[in-house]
């Protein structure tokens, strides 16, 4: 990447203030930018960073004035303008023409749609159905009787165990494992006997699942992820969970089995959810919280065990003053003893 | 799946009450069941759910009466009957005949037992020993000198680094990595120098390990997992840990190096355990707790740092009342000042 | 392994006290040693373990006296002597001669340096540059335009997405995924629209990354890991994080996007770090803590939300006494009521 500030002002249709020959060699957020980078300020709350950023060029809103040696470009929507610069300067995406790599091992009974791409060392087992325009990355494993909707994108090294069903436009990142056995045992005289896990997994349309995330198959019936839900890396979803639509589930979240999650729920990073619970629509569970009982719709929780987040925050502040409170109670006790003495002598 | 309530009553030898022609098309737990599903009530505490479940048919204990439009089938043991229905209606398991896939790369010095199955794109390095009836899933990697006991099942994409030893009937789910280097460094003038990790890993008979779990090799000597222990997905076991028999280790647990765990220990989801500790037999560590000192046998802990769980729960309840307690102490202080004034004027 | 105590005393140039014919068949730490093992005591604080260890031979400092039936070998530096024994008895490392396995799929435009080793079923895409003496383990995937420095070691089943850059001597353990898409969406009327992730990942020289760890590519610009930083297993690093040099990041840590970490920072196991923060040089975040604001250089934090660890510890101790404190406040209130009565009757 190598563009002048003048080139960029023209690209985004902006007003340049500063050195038009300033050369831009990279794009970055305002805090992490280095000399040669272009950045942007979308929100007035980041305006103070304009003074301290090391960026060479900054996209700002029309009225913005700031003391800076950086070159400013004023545009109606700096965020949209920045995306335009990013896309203009991004390396072209890798070309992925359709075709089945000769090394792939595809069962004779598998049905492949139009314009699919199957990369090297992929295994597609018996009776799999792959819809049109699906891309399956190198070294992936698609178990018996899986069905993949149109336009799915599986990055290299994805594993789908038998009978997994994907809706249209599902994106699975590398290392994702869908349909491993649920974690279920009968304990008989101290020994754990495996409970057969004969269900499967259904993933709705437009779901995206991050690298090395695991979603277990149902013990019976299916584990389900609703349309449009987005799951980050290294998340564990237990057997028979039923997750609604348009949820956001962040990295390292763990959900035990058979929990029902509504629509538009947010589980922040490293949240844990116990089994057999119900989480209502639009609930938000804050980072690292541990949910051990049902969550009403719209609730916002924090802490382990999780409680309403305003209550948690108040308790957390009070907790830090607890050693001081202990001291104050001790003093009260002493004063009371003292006063009792005075009172007795007064009587 | 498509069975009438009558068919099911016959299958489980039960007494039908309701519509014998009710058609069952799925199996599910009582909370998540939908119209057309069959479910069951094994425990009286779930009896109230009979009124609210959307299931069409419910397996219940002989004496059970409930107001419901669902068809009831009374059987001696509803849980066992339900498993019978699940197994009757489950799709037949995938057939996995023995044989070495022609694409597999098997070293000439590897010894394969009778009736083993080695799937596509598997690598088996020099001097590996694979016992009878072992199944190794597609794309797995079995490093030099590994030894696998009889009837082990490795799902696709398992990695065993050199000299890993598996007992009989070990189940490893996809993405499991056994024997990666332990995390150990000498820090010399701020730089971290790698400590060679020359030990290995031994896994006892009947151990099951979940998807994408990692178990590091010993720095010297071996990391050991005892017979019958079950480990869930995305768990990290550090170098030289020695875990006893019949333990349950849930998803996203992290154990640092060189910790000794007794038999029948339960570590719930997202528990963390520091290094060089000893956890006694039958101890239970509750979800997300952080263990930073030795745990006596039979203890039940919660919180970070972990303390006895009854103490943790009492403290957690009290913590929620802490802002109110602060207010009460402030009032006491004011009253005391006031009383001191009265007392002084009284004297 | 089978050595006499006499052989070992000679190997480490030590003074033997006890049975010179004691046979040693294994090496272990002092707590986990079994009969037949050799162990060592490097620090006086472990001296008491000499009485209870089951080890047959113990390496100790010159002046050490202890009541034990074990054979002692006195050496100037027991820790160094132990490493000598471990290395003497360790099985020879697996031989990994250079060469490209015939099954590997290497693009015609890829450039391979001298003496590289590419194992079976590896995919190397167009325009990749692999420097001298690199080893790429079986079943790995190296995406388009990646550049690998000299002497890198990738264990089996590593995934590098397009345009990842590795410095010299980088070690990536099995299951590592570098360059998967960052977790970023615009939410428009409740639906999450994917933000293109067009940046990449740069890993500095001498970095080591543990099994199944994931490091996301930049949304724009690059995610960066600084020279000499060591990352354990199952860690999640979000898009556009910039991590400094010589840091230690332990297992199951999760970092959201665009956070800047200084040099020599330690994040203990299961720590969570929110996005858009700055963590100063030499900071230490203790296990399971949740960082939600900027961390000054040299700080040591614990708890969620994280606070200075001395404050956290004091509050944690006080919290355990909280139920008792509640009782004391109630008693104070009662006494005050009582005293008020006395005072009133006195007036």
Image: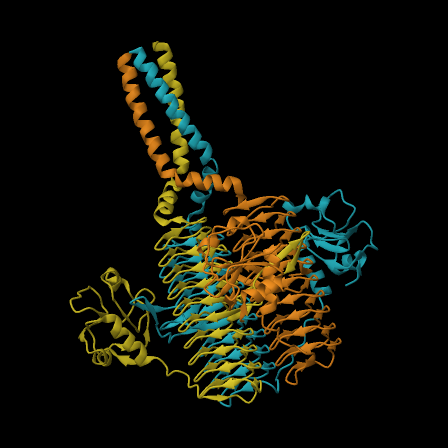
Chain colours: A cyan, B yellow, C orange
Closer to the camera, B145 or A22?
Answer: B145
Judged from this view, the residue extending furthest toward the right is A21
Quadrant for residue C233, please give it: bottom right
Give the number of marks.
0
Q: Residue at x 57, y 81 (%)?
A: B123
- Residue C208 vs A200, above or below: the answer is above
Quadrant for residue C120, please give it: bottom right
Percent x, y of residue C279: 62, 48
Q: Give the quarter of the figure containing the N terminus of chain C.
A: bottom right
Closer to the camera, A153 or A140?
Answer: A140
Query: Is any atom of residue A251 visible in this view?
Result: no
Percent x, y of residue A256: 40, 62
Percent x, y of residue A71: 78, 50
Whether residue A32 sits left or right of residue A7 in the image: it is left
- Residue C149 vs C66, above or below: the answer is below
Whether residue B89 sits left or right of residue A44 in the image: it is left
Q: Residue at x 31, y 71 (%)?
A: B35
Q: Residue at x 74, y 55 (%)?
A: A38
Closer to the camera, C200 or C166?
Answer: C166
Whether residue B11 sits left or right of residue A194 in the image: it is left
Q: Give the quarter of the figure containing the C terminus of chain C.
A: top left
């Amino acid at each position: 990447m190598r563009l002048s500030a003048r080139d960029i002002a023209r690209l985004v249709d902006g007003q340049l203030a500063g050195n038009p020959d300033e050369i831009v060699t990279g794009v970055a957020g305002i805090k992490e930018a280095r000399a040669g980078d272009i950045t942007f300020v979308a929100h007035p709350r980041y305006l103070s960073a304009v003074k301290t950023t090391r960026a060479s060029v900054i996209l700002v809103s029309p009225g913005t004035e700031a003391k800076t040696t950086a070159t400013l470009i004023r545009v109606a929507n700096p965020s949209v303008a920045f995306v335009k610069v990013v896309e203009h300067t991004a390396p072209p995406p890798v070309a992925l023409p359709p075709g089945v790599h000769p090394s792939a091992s595809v069962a004779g009974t598998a049905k492949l749609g139009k314009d699919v791409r199957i990369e090297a060392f992929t295994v597609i087992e018996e009776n799999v159905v792959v819809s049109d325009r699906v891309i399956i990355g190198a070294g992936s494993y698609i178990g018996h009787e899986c069905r993949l909707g149109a336009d799915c994108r599986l990055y290299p090294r994805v594993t789908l165990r038998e009978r997994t069903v994907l809706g249209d436009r599902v994106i699975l990142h590398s290392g994702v494992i869908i349909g491993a056995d649920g974690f279920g045992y009968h304990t008989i005289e101290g020994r754990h006997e495996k409970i057969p896990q004969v269900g499967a997994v259904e993933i709705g349309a437009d779901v995206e699942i991050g690298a090395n995330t695991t979603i277990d198959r149902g013990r019976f019936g299916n584990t389900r992820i609703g349309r449009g839900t987005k799951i980050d890396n290294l998340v564990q979803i237990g057997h028979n969970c039923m997750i609604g639509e348009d949820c956001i589930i962040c990295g390292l979240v763990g959900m035990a089995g058979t929990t029902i999650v509504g629509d538009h729920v947010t589980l922040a990073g490293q949240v844990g959810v116990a089994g057999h619970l119900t989480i209502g629509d639009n609930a938000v569970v804050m980072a690292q919280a541990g949910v051990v009982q049902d969550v009403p719709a719209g609730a916002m929780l924090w802490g382990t065990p999780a409680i309403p987040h305003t209550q948690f925050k108040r308790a957390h502040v009070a907790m830090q003053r607890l050693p001081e409170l202990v001291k104050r109670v001790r003093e009260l006790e002493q004063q009371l003893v003292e006063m009792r003495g005075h009172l007795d002598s007064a009587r």
